Image (cartoon, helix red, strand yellow):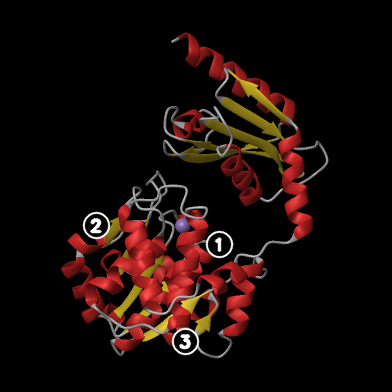
Amino acid sequence: MKIIEKKKALQKKFKKAKTIFIVAHKDLDLDALGSSIGIYSVLEKMKKNCFLIIDDKRNEAGVSKVLQELDGCLNIISSQMIQDYLYPRMKKNLLLILDTNKKELLQSEEILDFFEIEQRVILDHHDKGKTSIETGLELIDPEVSSTCEMVAAFIENYQIQIDPYYSTLVLAGIVLDTNNFTLKTTEDTYYAAYFLANQGASSKKVQYLLKQDLKEYIERQKLLLNVKIFDKTIAISKGGAYTIYRREDLAKVADTLLFFNDIETAFVIGKVSEKTIGISGRSLGKLNVGKILSSFNGGGDENGGAARIEKSTITKVEASLEKLLKEMERE
Ligand SMILES: [Mn+2]
């Protein structure tokens, strides 16, 4: 795993820094937050000044629970406040970017200006793209299930003891991103889970953090009613013309579709705003959904991807997707 291969370089960056700012993607999820807090607790042990940058105004349920439970335990600041906390010798500041590598997905793009390229480090498990942030050190490994798995490997490798509550958060990120150890799960993933359980992580607490809202669940299940099977192995589901879904809901339904017999690829199409259609794709690997969705100006990899199409309709997007799949079939 890259985090272990590049351990020395990472250690050097941490050693040199006095103040470390941790930032993840917008719309925090438990992988972003769990990895942020996991690494925060390690850096604190190294006697670093740590700040977690969060600009999100609203959070999903699990993230709100954690932030509430940890109220007052962490230095959490908004990107606007960063100037007040920078170490006076600018080179002694480090920006640690987690669970994303793209500028536009960061909590705030503007914070990048406070850090020279050398003072930025990325830890992530998403593919790189045109808008990837330039850094002095990047540990990007799309093969790894989650950023939390990377952080667990890091903690294990350093033989650091972390608080059971923090171990639980890191485990929650792994459980979320692997959809309960079904996606992208390798022996390293189980080993990370084993290690975290050994550190006192509670699977019961993980279950509590991942509890879902019943109404939202029902809304998502409705997406399954409109499923169409294409070429025996491809499921295409679509949302109602008047319902606006969150992007992660489309992704969750696509994940679910892969649980069914014969389905190897799944696409879910739905409105994500008044004028924007979202598509989320998931695949067991036979079809590269990231590549398919790049035709819609989206992206991803062979297992998962997404795209947003402005000023279109569900029917139009569905038709272009089917056309594309037919063309691929012919090739
Ligand atoms: Mn993640």
Is any atom of residue 4 visible in this view? Answer: yes
> Which residue does the image show at 63% across and 48% down from the upper left?
247
Look at the numbered disc 2 and give the secondary structure of its residue.
Answer: helix
Look at the numbered disc 3 and give the secondary structure of its residue.
Answer: helix
118 or 38, nearer to the observer: 38
Which callout, 3 or 2, points at the residue further toward the start of the chain?
2
Q: Quadrant of the C terminus?
A: top left
**Kind of residue indicated by mark 3:** Asp
> Which residue does the image show at 42% across and 73% down from the upper left?
22
* Image quadrant assignment for residue 65: bottom right
What is the number of the mark on residue 84?
Answer: 3
What is the number of the mark on residue 286?
Answer: none
Give the mark toward the camera: 3 or 2. Answer: 2
What is the number of the mark on residue 26?
Answer: 1
- Residue 94 percent location from the top left of the image: 32, 75
Is any atom of residue 110 visible in this view? Answer: no
275 or 188, nearer to the observer: 188
Mark 2 — residue? 2
Give the mark toward the camera: 1 or 2. Answer: 2
84 relative to 216 in the view: left or right: left
* Image quadrant assignment for residue 226: top right
- Residue 214 percent location from the top left of the image: 76, 59
> Which residue does the image show at 22% across and 81% down from the upper left?
15
**Kind of residue indicated by mark 2:** Lys
